Amino acid sequence: MATYPDTEVVQTEPIAYKQTGEVSSDETEVSLLDIVVLLAGEKRFIVRFVLGAAVLAAVVSFLLPIQYEAKIVLMPPSQSTSAGSALLGQLGNMGSLGSLASMTGLSMKNPADMYLAFLTSRTVEDALISRFNLMKEYHKKYLSDARKELEGRTTAAVGTKDGLIRLSIEDGDPKRAAELANGYVEEFRKLSASLAITEAARRRLFFEHQLQDAKDNLTKAEEAMRKTQQSTGVLQIDSQARSLIESAAILRAQVVAKQVQIQSMRSFAADDNPELILAKQQLAALEGQLQRVAGSQSDTGSDINLSKGRVTESGMEYVRRFRDLKYHETVYELLAKEFEIAKLDEAREGSIIQVVDAAVPPDKKAFPPRMLIVMGVTVLSFFLAAFWIVLRHGMARTFELPENQQRLETIKERWKEKQGTA
């Protein structure tokens, strides 16, 4: 009997330890069913919270400013074979310069991306801001801020399948939204009038400058020829020499044009490019023809090789001037033909960009989507309420555990000690 109390103590300690462990495990284990039961007990709070959030979302959605979206669809000009390229086969002497003009499209990337960049350029945007007085409409003090606001309201992209440009813009006034979308195209056309954007326009601008230089050189050659005739008294040379000089002048002009073409191709083509190899072969053939026509002896007074034995010494000065004159006449003729063809191509292309679907005032608002806002806030508020209930219940159970209560008391005591020390 003396050992009974000791035996009782030994038996109760493991039982107490086991019971304590089981309680701790049950308290910390949370299942989905427990959460459902917990939420069902707080259903009044959840309903009130969700309804309040839904009503607040509805009120806010009705207070948000209404925005209308106007859309416009554009078709950029295609980089197809031009009328000038189609006529190259019928213009034998201008083939070299014609090939040079057609080379501009070989390294061209997607043209729609370039037109999209011009369409949304700063110049076009500033013109729209000034035209529609958007600084006042957007309540902006600086032009840069108004430009950012306009860019934020504008969406433009190129279709990956059809290549069409689609531009949309949002505004509080449906009529002004359509006017802004159409205004993008109108201001772009004003900008493109001062730029050589299309392949034909670039060719026209290139040959326009070259033609002016050729015209100045031809005028100088004609003046030099007139002075030579007055000083030497020679007014005409024999037909054989004249034919030789004209042939050499034409060949020389073609050689120069082919050299310019090869130089242009080197900017984007590798040495093993078939087009570049063919151009080099054509240049060698033209140089060989020029060598056969001009002879082997070199006339140091000119760029064209011509045998002195075919022309008398008394007419050598006249030959030089006449040769220069025929050369500049040939170059001017080739450039003039190319310039006219480029003008025809540019006129054939018509407008730079075509409107497939013009923007019209939208009859339906694009923002705010009130129904989506209310539904989204309702669902979100339900999960927030559920999260708050589970979190609150979990915190309450956590602090009910004796060890956590002891830890909390320890924290309070240390906090008081720290405050007292301070």
Image: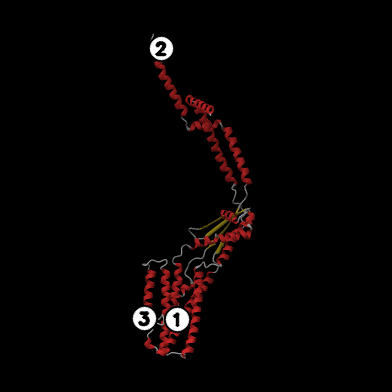
Q: Is residue 262 above or below residue 362?
A: below
Q: Amino acid at mark 1?
A: Tyr
- Place of residue 346 in the rendered image (x, y in percent of width and height, measured from the top left): 52, 71
Contact flag, marks 3 and 1 (Cβ < 8 Å)? no
Number of the label disc, if any, that sits on residue 384: none
Q: Residue at x 59, y 48 (%)?
A: 369
Contact flag, marks 3 and 2 (Cβ < 8 Å)? no
Number of the label disc, if any, that sits on residue 327: 1
- Is tag 3's residue or tag 2's residue first in the polypeptide sequence? 2
- Place of residue 352 in the rendered image (x, y in percent of width and height, measured from the top left): 54, 66
Q: Amino acid at mark 3?
A: Gln
| Residue underneath mark 3 | 291
Q: SS of the residue at dot 2? A: helix
Closer-to-camera residue (111/161): 111
Q: Is residue 403 above or below residue 96?
A: above
Image check: 57 left or right of 236?
right
Closer-to-camera residue (63/361): 63
- Is tag 1's residue or tag 2's residue first in the polypeptide sequence? 2
Q: SS of the residue at dot 3? A: helix
Measured Cα–Cα span from mark 1 to mark 2? 133 Å
